Each structure stands twice: as C-alpha cells, then as structure tokens.
Image (spheres, rainbow, N blue to C red):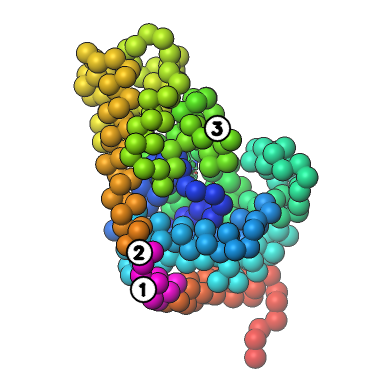
C-alpha cells in the first residue's frame, strides 16, 4: 500500500477552506493508502501562542479529524511534538536547503508582513520542517489545498537533492488537490483565500458555526449585480459559491448552472448554505460526542504516537547513517 501524509496547524478555528481543501479529501483517500494525519504543533509556534490555548486547540483538532470521518484505528492520527524525529530530520534537511530557496516562499513573505514584530528563524525554515514531515514517512501523496503548492515543490526539490547525493533515500511525494474546493475564497473578498485569521467575521465559515450563522454568512456573501448563476472568471463571488457547492454535492459546473438557471442569487446562496450545513452539522455532533470521551481519545493519542514514532524512526536512522553520523552501539 502507498503512503499518504498530511497535516494541519492547530491555530484558530478551522474554516470551510480547511475542510473542503484538505480534510474532506483525506476521508476519501483513507481506504486507498496507509495514512498519517498529523497535528502540526511544532509549526504552530512560529507564531506566538498561548500555551493553554495551543494545547486545547491541538486536542480539538485531533478530535476534529476523527469527527470528519477519519478512522483513528486504521489511520495514524498524532501530534507532531510527540515524534521527535520531525525536529531531527528537519535539522538535517536545513543543511540541504538554500537561503535563496526559502527567500522565495510567498507564505514567508505574507506571514512576515503580518507578524512583522516576530519574524523568527522558525518562520523562515517552516517549509523545511514541512518537508521533514512528509519525507519521514516516505509519503507518496500529500492531499492539501492549492495554497500549499509551493511548499510541496520545495519538499520535492530537497528530497531530490538529498537523493542525488546519497542514493534513493526518500520517496518523492506528489501533491493531491481535489477537483473542487482546492481554493476556497473569502465570502467578503472572493479574490482572497478564506483564512482562519481574517478579521472580518463574515469572510469565513468556521467548522463550528451553527446553521443559522452559516445561512446568514452566505446571504451576506459578496457577489455581483447580474443575478445569473454562471461559472466564470469574471464572477469570482459566484464562482466561489459554485465551487463550494460543487465540492460538497459532486456536481459539475454545468449541472449547477442548470439547477439554478431559473433562480436568483438569494435562493442559490441559501442552497449553498444548506449544503454546507448538511456536512458540518453531523461533524459538529460527532465532535461533541468525542469531547465527552476522554479515555478513548487518550488511548488513540498514545497508540498512534507509538506507531508514528516507529515509522519515522526507520527513515531517520537511515538518513543519519547516510550523512555519516556514528552507528549506535
Ligand atoms: P494549514 O493549517 O494552513 O491548512 C490546513 C489545510 O487546509 C488547506 N486550506 C485550504 N484549502 C482550500 N481553500 C482554503 N481557503 C484553504 N485554507 C487552508 C491547506 O492547503 C492545508 O491543506 N503548512 C501546512 C501544514 C503542514 C502540512 C505538513 C501539510 C505542515 N506540515 C505536511 C501537509 C503535509 C499549513 O499551514 O496548513
């Protein structure tokens, strides 16, 4: 079986973008692959965090993975900080990554503008840690949203460079983007990605939003003035709503155009909202159930950390030998 790896940061409440761009595809792919789903808490501290809040969010995120439908007994769901090989491989790969490459990362530029009071070295080498995450498990495929494309490219470059020097150590991973939903945009500024850190509360649907809030936010979504549900570059607002609807229902753009050919934007927006509720409501209910089941979750965390440590250790030891670290006696 081939291996799949993906992860999310435990910062803020997840949005519909995280769900449609990544989480939803994870569930679809879990049958086909050996899957590792990580809560990337090491990445989270590149931005200052409140310790108690980070701990809670990390646990909530792990429960959310399960609530979204990932089977924690068949797949490995774990915290990055419980597997020290991530940090160790990351250090080694730092020595095989050029400053120039990291300087070109658009996410670093964006984040250092936003957090100009804390442009730390971790923020700069963030993509190297991400490469380590992926390469540690010899991952074949990495399901992510389109915003992670550049990070996947640098991962492949680092892996190829390392393999070029030491032989075939790492599997070269392929990104996986869903057909629709790889780039969910803000409901208020549809040319900008939907993000958990948006200041405008109407810009994003949070996975914790209740049905009435979801409908309200969709009703307020920015569109255009022509009232025709058509998939077009010139209609970023409607196109985004259509993408969301297509990702959830599996319909094609043509089918959605046909379905709403005689309705105005008002009805269409409500239909999109209802489709989102149909997936988020069950997810929220399962999340609430899991929150009450502390022992079960603790068991998952313990068993999976052991599994992840074992798998990661194999690659790490191989890499350590290749670069010339002394054998353990
Ligand atoms: P993060 O935590 O920002 O986002 C988690 C996942 O959600 C996707 N996503 C979106 N997809 C579509 N539309 C959007 N508006 C949207 N917003 C977010 C992201 O593409 C991502 O798949 N660097 C990663 C975390 C990471 C990782 C990894 C991912 C660390 N190591 C190894 C894969 C493999 C990140 O910050 O994701």
Q: Main secondary structure of the magenta part?
A: helix
Q: Which residue is mark 3?
A: 200
Q: Which residue is mark 2?
A: 290
Decide which of tag 3 and tag 2 comes sooner along the chain. Answer: 3
Magenta region includes residue 307: no
Dot 3 lies on which element? loop
Q: Residues within 10 Å of mark 1 (few under 14, many from 20)?
A: few
Is the CB of the residue bearing disc 2 within 8 angstroms of ligand 1? no
Residue drawn at point x = 50 percent, y = 48 percent: 13
Q: Where is the C terminus found, in terms of image quarters?
A: bottom right
Q: Residue 72: image x %, image y %?
A: 35, 66
Residue that sits furthest to the top in the current view: 226
In this rendering, the answer to whether 317 lies above or below 206 is below
Q: Residue 210: image x %, image y %?
A: 36, 43
Please tell me which residue lies in front, 233 or 278. Answer: 278
| Cα–Cα gap, marks 3 and 1 | 37 Å
Q: Residue 328: image x %, image y %?
A: 65, 86
Quadrant of the rendered structure where residue 214 is? top left
Quadrant of the rendered structure where residue 111 is? top right
Dot 2 lies on which element? helix
Q: Where is the N terminus found, in terms of image quarters?
A: bottom left
| Cα–Cα gap, marks 2 and 1 | 8 Å
Q: Which mark is residue 242?
A: none
Does the CB distance between marks 2 and 1 fall below 8 Å?
yes
Q: Which residue is mark 1?
A: 296
Residue range in magenta is: 290-301
Please tell me which residue lies in front, 170 or 250. Answer: 250
Q: Residues within 10 Å of mark 2 (few under 14, many from 20)?
A: some
């Amino acid at each position: 079986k081939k291996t799949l790896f993906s992860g999310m940061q435990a910062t803020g409440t997840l949005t519909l973008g995280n769900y449609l761009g990544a989480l939803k595809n994870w569930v679809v792919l879990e049958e086909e692959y050996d899957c590792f789903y990580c809560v990337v808490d090491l990445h989270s501290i590149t931005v200052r965090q409140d310790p108690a809040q980070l701990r809670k969010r990390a646990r909530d995120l792990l429960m959310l993975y399960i609530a979204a439908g990932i089977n924690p007994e068949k797949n490995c769901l774990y915290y990055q900080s419980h597997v020290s090989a991530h940090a160790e491989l990351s250090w080694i790969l730092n020595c095989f990554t050029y400053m120039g490459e990291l300087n070109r990362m658009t996410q670093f530029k964006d984040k250092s503008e936003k957090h100009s009071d804390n442009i730390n070295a971790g923020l700069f080498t963030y993509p190297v840690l991400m490469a380590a995450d992926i390469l540690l498990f010899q991952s074949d495929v990495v399901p992510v949203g389109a915003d992670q494309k550049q990070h996947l490219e640098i991962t492949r470059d680092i892996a190829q460079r390392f393999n070029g020097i030491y032989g075939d150590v790492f599997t070269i991973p392929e990104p996986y983007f869903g057909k629709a939903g790889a780039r969910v945009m803000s409901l208020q500024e549809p040319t900008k990605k939907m993000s958990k850190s948006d200041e405008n509360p109407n810009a994003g649907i949070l996975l914790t939003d209740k049905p009435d809030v979801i409908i309200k936010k969709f009703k307020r979504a920015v569109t255009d003035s022509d009232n025709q549900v058509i998939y077009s570059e010139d209609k970023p607002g409607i196109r985004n709503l259509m993408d969301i609807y297509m990702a959830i229902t599996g319909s094609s753009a043509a089918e959605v155009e046909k379905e709403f050919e005689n309705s105005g934007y008002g009805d269409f927006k409500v239909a999109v909202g209802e489709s989102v509720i149909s997936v988020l409501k069950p997810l929220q209910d399962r999340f609430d159930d899991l929150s009450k089941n502390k022992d079960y979750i603790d068991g998952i965390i313990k068993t999976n950390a052991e599994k992840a440590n074992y798998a990661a250790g194999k690659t790490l030891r191989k890499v350590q030998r290749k670069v010339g670290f002394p054998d353990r006696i």
